[in-house]
Amino acid sequence: MARLPRLTLPGYPHHVIQRGNNRQSIFAKTADYQRLLDLLDDNARQFEVAIHAYVLMSNHFHLLVTPQSSDGLPQMMQAVGRRYVRYFNDSQQRSGTLWEGRYRSTLIQTDRYLLACMAYIDLNPVRAGLVAQAAEYPWTSHGHYIGRQMDKLVTPHPLVWALGNTPFAREAAYAELVQAGVNPVHQSALTQATLSGWALGEPDFVADLQKRTQRRVAKGQAGRPQAGKNL
């Protein structure tokens, strides 16, 4: 059975995971992390993809993004992936693949999962035992949201602006949100949806999405939507 194309719709937030092949490291030195961030910045601008949150781990990375077109996200990921592999192979005098196949992604319901997804991303280094607090890890957007640094790669989602009326209030509220952690149910849902490629949200949200694409958006929804239904 042929695999489904990725679910990508403009104007919606998407959680993305790209892993190293066989869980191998995708970074050999500090400069490699910065190189990937620079490539993400360049190509996010070129393909009009807003990057709301990210974390670079030793053998994979996470992004939370909103593309402005249906092909912006895949074009960005393809360009970043190819250019980074060339850079990494040249610098390490190696050849061959670096990535574990194509990236994984899911489209998420903003009001229910966006802030949870941001905290999920920020807490990756904590769950991995690399740091005790999210703020201690350098290769993440977390520092931008708690006011420790300005990150040109980050485009805050409007939902973040609603956390407070001043920068200080927003930073404090976001730090508290991450400190509180992610509901285990939400954490599991975010992981499984991203790896499977099904949309993540309440039934009404998923049903509305299905009207906007011919690609199935949820497991168990067989067949194609009826013609003329807001495709």
Image: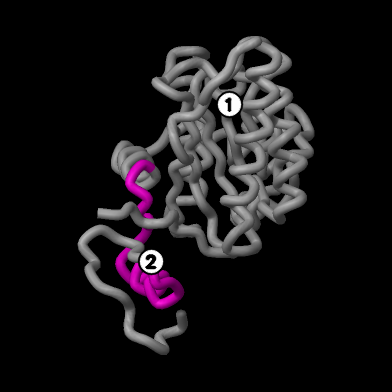
Task: Specify the amino acid type for callout 1.
Answer: Leu
Left or right placement of residue 219 versus residue 153 in this view: left
- The stretch drawn in magenta includes residue 106: no
Q: In this view, does 132 lie above or below 180?
A: above
Q: In this view, does 211 lie above or below 81?
A: below
Q: Looking at the image, which residue sits at the far front?
A: 95
Quadrant that contains the N terminus = bottom left
Label 1: which secondary element: strand
Residue 165 screen position, x and y as percent: 71, 53
Q: Nearer the viewer, mark 2 or mark 1?
A: 2
Residue 206 screen position, x and y as percent: 36, 66
Measure the C-alpha gap from mark 2 to mark 1.
30 Å
Q: Nearer the viewer, residue 80 or 156?
A: 80
Q: Give the range drawn in magenta.
A: 195-214
Left or right placement of residue 207 versus residue 13 in this view: left
Label 2: which secondary element: loop
Q: Looking at the image, which residue sits at the far bottom?
A: 228
Q: Name the residue under label 1.
A: 56
The disc at residue 215 is 2
Residue found 44% across the figure and 30% down from its top: 100
Q: Residues within 10 Å of mark 1 (few under 14, many from 20)?
A: many
Task: Specify the amino acid type for callout 2.
Answer: Arg
